[in-house]
Amino acid sequence: MSIIKFHQDLKVYQESFKTAMEIFELTKIFPKEELYSLTDQIRRSSRSVSVNISEAWGKRKYEKSFVAKLTDSEGEARETQSWLEFALACKYIKEEQYNNLNKQYNHIIGMLVIMMNQSEKWCSFVGK
C-alpha cells in the first residue's frame, strides 16, 4: 500500500469526485424549472461528499473532527441518493442511470464507514 499524502490520493475521494462529475453532466438535461431546486440540490450534495472528505483529511490531527467530517460526507452521499430517487420518479433519468449511480454511492458510503470505523489507523501517523 502506498503512502497517502493528499486527499486526492484517497480512492474514496477519487470515486466521489468522479461520480459528482457524472451527476453534473447528467443534470445538464434536467428541465429549466428544476434549476434552483432539484438540479442545484443534487449538484451541491454530490460535490459536498468530496469536499467533506477533503476537510476530514485536513483534520486528521483530531480524530473526532476527522470522523465528524466523514460523517458529514456520508450524510451528503445519502442525500444525493434521495435526490437521485426524485430524479427517477420525475423521469429525468432512466432506471439504469439511477441504479448505476445509487450503486456507486453505496460503494462510497461503504468506504467512508470503513474509514470511520478504523479512524485511529488514518489519524495515528499525524505528527510523527
Image: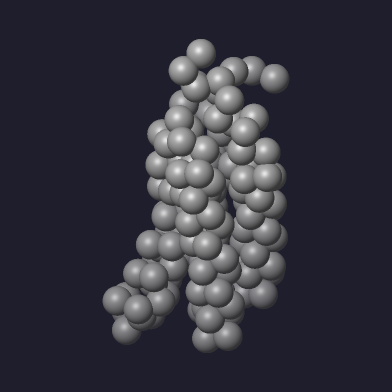
The residue nearer to you, when weighing 16 against 51, is 51
Q: Quadrant of residue 94?
A: bottom right
Taking the image as shown, residue 25 lies to the left or right of residue 106, namely left
Q: Colour mode?
A: one colour
The residue nearer to you, when weighing 30 against 51, is 51
Q: In this view, does 98 lie above or below 22?
A: below
Residue drawn at point x = 47 percent, y = 49 percent: 69
Residue closest to the far top: 128
Residue 112: x %, y % from top left: 62, 48
Residue 25: x %, y % from top left: 45, 58
Residue drawn at point x = 61 percent, y = 38 percent: 119
Residue 65 visible in the picture: yes
Q: Is residue 28 above or below residue 51?
A: below
Q: In this view, does 86 lie above or below 39?
A: below
Residue 23 visible in the picture: no
Q: Is residue 89 above or below residue 68?
A: below
Q: Quadrant of residue 122?
A: top right
Residue drawn at point x = 46 percent, y = 18 percent: 127
Q: From the image, which quarter does the N terminus lie in?
A: top right
Residue 111: x %, y % from top left: 66, 46
Residue 82: x %, y % from top left: 55, 74
Residue drawn at point x = 40 percent, y = 76 percent: 38
Q: How many marks?
A: 0
